[in-house]
Image: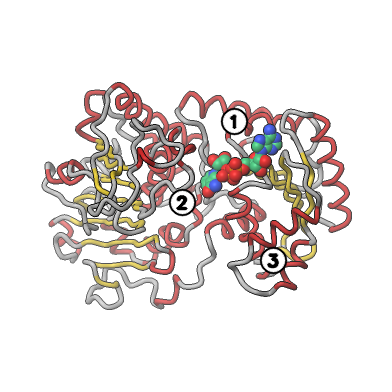
Amino acid sequence: AKEKSAIFIIFGGSGDLAHRKLYPALYRLYKAGVLKDHFAVIGTARRPWSDDYFRETVVTSLENLDDDKQKMEEFAKHFFYQSHNVNDSKHYIALKELAAKLDDQFSAGHNRVYYMAIAPRFFGTVAEHINSEGLKTKNGFNRLVIEKPFGRDLASASELNNDLSKAFPEEEIYRIDHYLGKKMIQEIPNIRLKNPKFDKALSGKYVSNIQVTLGESLGVEDRGGYYETSGVLRDMVQNHIMQIIGSIAMDKPDEMTAESIHKVKTDLFSSLKVLDPEEVNRAFVRGQYDTDRLGKQTAYRDEENVDDNSNIETYAAGKIEFDDERWANVPFYVRSGKRMPDKSSRIDIVFNDQASKLGINPNTTVSLLIEPENGHSILVNGIDYQDSNQDLIKFPEDKTYFDDAREAYESLIIDILSGDRIHFTLWDELQSTWKYIDVIREQWDLETPKFPNYLSGTMGPEAADTLLERDGNSWVWDD
Ligand code: NAD
C-alpha cells in the first residue's frame, strides 16, 4: 500500500486497547511505509500527561516488536497528548486546534480518523461533540472508528446508532470486528472464486452442516469486571461468529465492492431464523468453567472482579438456521468458549452424500483454520489441502500464501485510511444479529443455570455434543 496521510485522534489514548493493539499496528504500518511523514497521532484521555511521557508509553508498547530503538523514537515523534474530559466542550476546541496545527506541520491533507478506544458509554457523547464543536474538516476525510461492543442488545445498539448517526453519516462510520481483519476470513471470497467446485458445493444441496468454533485456552485473565457485564454470547457470538458465518454463507456478490458484499451479507442476516423463546434451550447450550482436572486453575467464579455466584456464561454453543433458499435446513453449529484445550478458531464445512454428484466424496470436510494465525491453513478431511489427494481445494497454489499476513488491526487501519468499508460491519447487519441474540439472552436471564458445568481444559459441557448428536452429527474439532 502506498503512503497515507491523516491525523488520528485516539480517544482513550492511555488505555489498554490503544497500547496493546493500536500503537503496535501503527508502528508496523510505519515500518511498511504506509505511514511515513504525513501523519500524527493525538492521544487523549483524562490523565494529564506530557507529550514526552506519552511517547515513552508508546515506545514501551512496541518493545516486543523489534529492537530498532531509533525507528521507534522517530515514530514516537509523531505522537502528541492532550488531556481531555469527554463531557467538556472546551477540550474539543483544544483538540480541534491541535489537530489543525499538526495537519499544517505534517501536511496531513485535512484527513481525520477519530478512534473510540474508550468505554462504550462515551461513544455517543464523543461523536456528538466532534460534530458540534466543528472538529470535522471540509476538504479531507472524516472517519469515525468504533470498537466493540456495539450495544448490549438491540435497544441499546439502536440508541447508540441514533446518537452516532446524528454526528456521522453511515459511510463515515467504521465499526470494527477484528475477525474481519484476519487474513483467512478476508480470503474466503477469493477461496470460493478460485475453487469453483467448492463454491458450487456451498449450498444446502451438498452441505450437511457448517461449524464455526472460536475457542480460547485462556480464562478471563484480568478482564473479569468487563466479562461480568458481557458473557460469551454478547462478546463473541453476536459479532465475530455471526460475521464469520456471513463471510462463508453469503451469496456471491455482484462485484467485490463494499456495497455489493454488504448487500449479500445483509440479505443473509435478515433471513436468520429467530428462535421462539421455548426453542432456546433446545438450540443453545451455555457453560461456565470450573477449575481443571487437577484443581490447579481458577474457576470462573473465583476470578478477580467476578461474583461468587455469577451466572455469566464463558461458553456457548448453538444451532443457527436461515430461512434462505441456499441454506434451507442446513444447521450452522457454533461455539465459543474460554478455557478450552487450545486457542483455535475455525470453520468446518461437512458435505453430505449428494456432494458425490459433484465428484466430492460423501462426508468430506473442509476446514478453514483462522487461528492461531501462524497456523492458518485449509484442511480437507483433516489433512493439509496440498498433501491430500483431492481437487476440491486447489487454490492457493502456493502454501506460503498465508504467511506474512498483516495483523488484523494493521490491515483494518489501512482500510480505514483507504476508505474501504468491506471489512467493517454495517448497522443493518447488527440489527439482525442483535434481534437473534436478544431472544436467547432474555430466555437465559429468566432461568438459573447449573454453573459451573465444565472443567477448564475441556471441550465444554456435554450438552454441546448432544446438540449435534440429536441431528446425527458431531463436532469436527474434538480434542
Ligand atoms: P481502558 O480502560 O484500558 O481505557 C479506557 C480509556 O478511556 C483510558 O485511556 C481512559 O483514560 C479513558 N477515559 C475514561 N474515562 C474518560 C473520560 N471521562 N474522559 C476522557 N477519557 C476517559 O479500556 P480498553 O480496554 O482500552 O477499552 C477501550 C475500548 O475498546 C472499549 O470500548 C472496549 O470495549 C474496546 N475493546 C477493548 C479490547 C481490549 O483488548 N482491551 C478489545 C476489544 C474492544
Can residue 174 be seen from the camera position used here? no
Q: Residues within 10 Å of mark 1 (few under 14, many from 20)?
A: few
Residue 317 vs 108, above or below: the answer is above
Nearer the camera: disc 3 or disc 1: 1
Q: Residue at x 21, y 41 (%)?
A: 329
How far is the residue under mark 1 from the one under mark 2?
Answer: 38 Å
Does the closest atom of ligand 1 sit within 8 Å of the Cβ of label 3? no
At label 1, the amino acid type is Arg
Location of residue 32 (image quadrant): bottom right
How far is the residue under mark 3 from the one under mark 1?
Answer: 31 Å
Q: Residue at x 63, y 46 (%)?
A: 15
Tell whether 305 sits left or right of 169.
left
Residue 121 numbered mark, or none: 1
Q: Residue at x 67, y 27 (%)?
A: 166
Which residue carries the number 3 mark? 30
Mark 2 falls on what kind of element?
loop
**Quadrant the C terminus occupies:** bottom left
Q: Residue at x 76, y 51 (%)?
A: 7
Residue 404 vs 422, above or below: the answer is below
* Most distant residue in the top direction: 446
Which residue carries the number 2 mark? 254
How far is the residue under mark 3 from the one under mark 2?
Answer: 35 Å
Instruction: Please state the horizontal and vertical placement of residue 160, each as a whole percent of the image.
Output: 57, 28
Its colouring scheme is secondary structure
Residue 307 vs 20, above or below: the answer is above
